[in-house]
Image (tube, rainbow, N blue to C red):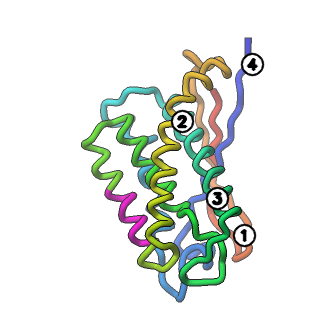
Amino acid sequence: MYRKWFFTLVLTCLLPFGAAGQWHTSNQYHFDNAIQFLPLAMELGLGFCTPHQQTFTDRFLVAATGYLVMGTTVFTLKTFTASKRPDSDATNSFPSGHTATAFLGAELVRLEYGTGWAIGAYSIATLTAVMRVYHDRHRIEDTLAGAGIGILSAHIAHRLLPVWKELLNLEGTPLQVSALPCCMPTQEGAVAGLALSVRF
């Protein structure tokens, strides 16, 4: 019998005037830094107000697993390809992490809630990709690769859900959630965030 596990997911909710380097380039506010997370928020939150297939515990595990798979893949490719960004000397252009995050959430919405809600989620994800190109942060091929990684990560996460549930003995386990505001230091200054502790 496995003991109950504790998971802490720190969601960094960047604020418009938080880290200057994250939110604007050439004094422009880039809202794509925020909207990339909207499809993922839809995947977790829609279950409280619309018919769904999985429990919140399952949706949370799928989202966390997908984010882990996507983040690892994006970081690895960025490190090894060292592609220069269109607007700077930074060499982490390929693939687009923002786009991968947005399309991961959009595909999770489609898998959980169907085509109707997915249209909205995919519209947000597509807008995120377009804005990354518009702001000269990425090239089109960067965003296309990011979209593919996000969608693939969503399917991998769904396949891994039964493995997690068996490994962690989560069947029928109640979920306890607590949230606490936090402040995370960055090179550009302090950034507001939200620490979300989830107990299974």
**Marks 3 and 4, the one that precedes in the sequence:** 4
User: Looking at the picture, how far across and down is residue 38, in whole percent?
Assistant: 43, 54
**For the residues marked 4 and 1, what is the alpha-carbon distance in whole angstroms?**
35 Å
The kind of secondary structure element at disc 2 is helix
Residue 126 forms part of the magenta stretch: yes
Q: Callout 2 environment at 10 Å: few (<14), some (14 to 19), or many (20+)?
A: many
**Marks 3 and 1, the one that precedes in the sequence:** 3
Res 77 label: 3
The kind of secondary structure element at disc 4 is loop
Figure quadrant of residue 86: bottom right
* x 67%, y 20%: residue: 167
The kind of secondary structure element at disc 1 is strand
**For the residues marked 3 and 1, what is the alpha-carbon distance in whole angstroms?**
23 Å
Picture quarter with the N terminus: top right
Residue type pointed to by label 4 = Arg
- Cβ atoms at labels 3 and 2 below 8 Å apart: no
Res 3 label: 4
User: Looking at the picture, how far across and down is residue 99, in whole percent?
Assistant: 48, 60
Q: Is residue 139 above or below residue 160?
A: below
Res 157 label: 2
Q: Which residues are magenta?
A: 123-131
- Cβ atoms at labels 3 and 1 below 8 Å apart: no
The residue that disc 1 covers is 186
